[in-house]
Amino acid sequence: MSARNAAKITVIGWDGGALPARARAALAEATLVVGGARHLDALGLRADAGVDDSRVTITLGPLAPALAALAAHDGPAAVLASGDPGFFGVLRALTEAGLDPDRVVPATSSVATAFARAGVAWDDALVVSAHGSGDGRDLRRAANVCRAHAKVAVLTAPGAGPGRLAVELLHGGLGVQRILVVAQCLDNGADTEPVINRPNDFNSPPDNHRTSGNPEGPAGDQGRAVGVGVPVSAAERVEFLTLGDAAARDGFAEPNVVLCLDPRQVAVPGHGSLPQAAGGGRPDTRRAGGKRWLAGWPGACGGWALGEESFAHRDGQITKAEVRALVLARLAPRVGDLVWDLGAGSGSVGIECARLGAAVVAVEQDADACARLAENAEAHGVQVAVVRGRAPGVLTDLPWPDAVFVGGGGIDVVRGALEHRPTRVVVALAGVERVGEVARSLEADGRAVGGVLSQSSRMVPLPDGTHRFAALNPVYIVWGSAA
């Protein structure tokens, strides 16, 4: 028989509560049960439990052996999973392997439970997973989403838990303002009320300090919450923590889910403040009467490569829309990326990257320009970390970027940016003499290099009602992409 038809598979989600009758019936009938050790233990289904010698039980480790066993099995099978198997769960792996379940019995997802325990609506939240290769990229990507967006749920992983996430968000001292709601042991199966530590006071200055604790130490050690301290245990518990408190903790009970909330934009219970009105850059996702129509982040409104009038700037010192369009295309900013805007000026490039969902750090040495940049970001309803300083020296302690735009500062800035291994680098130049040295630096770094001379002319009216095309200053755009 084919893998698609051999086994009659029921996928069962478990959230710690009593299983529904159809799930219990499927388990009783199954001659093959696949699940994680925690679920099998909680439901008394481990192979050594002595309940049913005729049933084969596979404890999940690597997924491939379990998929192979299911494909070879001829008879009823059950797969146990956490919460909703179709939400970052095993259902995708099954269907992609050609193992189409006969039935899926979902439970409440851990994300839905975490938001419910916190008392926060989540139809406008982004959900990201820190599970992945284990080399830190997935955690950095999750942190970038948290930097750029006000309401994010993070599905944690070993080595990528709440403490590590907090440390990553504190990286560089960028003044990130976030509350972490850490929901632990949501599916522990205990018939008790969850312990919820609500905040006493989150009106302190933003966390921008480094910590020296071991944020992913052994679970079970006691840590300090902003509310009332409660020892880590197997009981379901939800804690509201500042970034500094989370980073200093020695461990969190597992499994856990983290909600990363910006108290300036999200109504956090116990915080005592209402969310601020969103700026012009965030599209309205509500219908008339205040009802939302789209879940998650809706994306930027009003297009991209906005006119210069959309940004406060000084004496025409702004990257023109025509140039910005090509720069954005080569930077390719997206949700989960971190973009550096170096020599940011008005911040038009960085702000447009933020409007497209990326996290952005804008570096500018002029104090007045920094102030305008911050005002522009607020006007567009996006979050941009503004760093006053001179590159490349100021780059040393910043979180590593995925893409870099260099709008000023010379070849030393380009070389300094390359030391941080971004995937994409785009440089805008006014003088042709500098094109060669920039291209050579990018090539020496092993990148695929390209360039364009942008010569645009805009239609302008004449006194007699006709029009002419007025030339803009030429700009050389050079880029390099990692192979």
Image: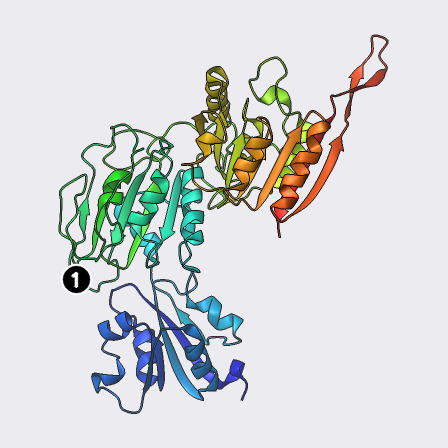
Task: Say what secondary structure mark 1 lies in.
Answer: loop
Q: Nearer the viewer, residue 90 or 290?
A: 90
- Which residue occupies 67% across, 35% down? 437
- Residue at the spot 45% in from the left edge and 48% down from the top edge: 141
**Image position, residue 314 (x, y; %):** 58, 14
**Residue 454: which quarter of the image?**
top right
Q: Position of residue 296 (x, y in %)?
A: 46, 45
User: Horizontal and vertical percent for residue 356?
Assistant: 55, 38
Type of amino acid at the residue the image marks with label 1: Asp
* Front residue of this view, candidates 461 and 331: 331
- Tally the numbered discs: 1
Judged left or right of residue 465, residue 250 is left
Residue 270 x %, y %: 23, 35
Along the line of sight, which residue is nearer the eye, 190 or 365?
A: 365
The answer to whether any part of residue 468 appears in the image is yes
Residue at position x 39%, y 45% from top?
A: 152
Q: Is 351 on the left or on the right of 170, as rendered?
A: right
Label 1: which residue? 191
